[in-house]
Amino acid sequence: MDRFQAMQVFVRVVDANSFTRAADSLSLPRTTVTTIIQNLERLLGVRLLNRTTRRIGLTPDGAGYYQHCVRILADVEETEACFQEAALRLKGRLRIDVPTSIGRLILIPALCDFHDKYPDVELVLGLGDRPVDMVQEAVDCVIRAGDLEDSSLVARRIGTLQTVTCASPPYVARHGMPQTIEALRDHYAVHYFSSRTGRNCAWDFNVDGKHQEADMKGSVAVNEAGAYLDCGLKGFGLIQVPRYMALPHLQSGELIEVLPQWKPSPTAISVLYPQSRQLSPKVRAFTDWVAELFAGCPLLSGRDETDPAAAHCGVYARSQGAQPATVGAAMPSPALPGMPPRRRSAREEAAEYAL
């Protein structure tokens, strides 16, 4: 029996929680996968998995063996990577998942550079604002904002998400400009709700180093960043949106910053990947590349557009082409019926908010 292959098969079965999915991902017949696991258990003299008709569970011996296998396989992969003559030898499929706005505005414009460096890597880019099951969907890594909650994932911080509160000129003309956080209770908000829980994200401000939430009536709620920005531009209410998305519209006059003295709290942006894949050369290469990309953009690295580096940032460069909007131009002011917001904590579902 090939013990190394047996370890690979065992880890894949555990990660996929399915013999069938593991077999498909390894391009092996299911009967072969089953036989390999049975032979491995016979060789070790212990039962590694508890099998039922609905699920697979690790035995205590299986859990210990799994941790050892993960480390051994990672060490082998790292060792092989060390002997590659050049990074261009990296090849194969790399599946990542990113928020739609980051994918469209940041990653895709720079993908030619990634392809030039790693021409043999097939990048499968998933765009969306929903949470993904990295194991079940065979995703190698994701980009998300917020604190790491899943202890089975490893996070590498690559940037800082700066959020701005703003409104369209027609909204301000109709409802006025709020001067205090307390005044927001008399205004309407476009709410962003979690695809997973259905709850609205709280409106959050940093006041003297402390988080402060604001209660606001809702005019409409969406769960996709582009639609959220569009609703704000159309005057449906105030929005809290990533500054890199809002910048062209702030410069053109289509949006006006609200309460600039009280900024929304910044949020960390990280690349997340399963522990069992933390040393994958392809994941490491992508993580290094995207970290360098974010570091070169002030709006994603804790700085602002006044930084000299902004001249070389794709987001800022695109914003220079924005055409000024005519304040007061024909833009319908929608009806704003009272819609009580559903509350949640400021950090809940942070990985989905404002992305």
Image: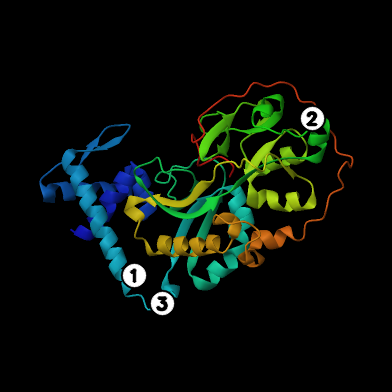
Q: Residue furthest front?
A: 208
N-terminal of the pair, mark 2 or mark 3, is: 3
N-terminal of the pair, mark 1 or mark 2, is: 1
Seen in the picture, residue 61 relative to 251 is either above or below; the reply is: above
Residue 343 figure quarter: top right
Instruction: Look at the numbered disc 3 and give the secondary structure of its residue.
Output: loop
Is residue 2 among the parts visible in the rendering?
no
Between residue 197 and residue 17, name the one nearer to us.
197
- Residue at 51 percent across and 64 percent down: it is 292
Kindly report which numbered mark, 2 or 3, lies closer to the viewer in this rendering.
2
Residue 121, given in percent of the width and then of the height, sits at 48, 66
Residue marked by disc 3 = 86
Crowd rating for badge 2 (residues with CA inside 10 Å; few <14, some 14–19, many 20+): few
Q: Quadrant of the N terminus?
A: bottom left
Crowd rating for badge 3 (residues with CA inside 10 Å; few <14, some 14–19, many 20+): few
Seen in the picture, residue 337 relative to 74 is either above or below; the reply is: above
Residue marked by disc 1 = 81
Answer with left or right where residue 271 lies relative to residue 126: left
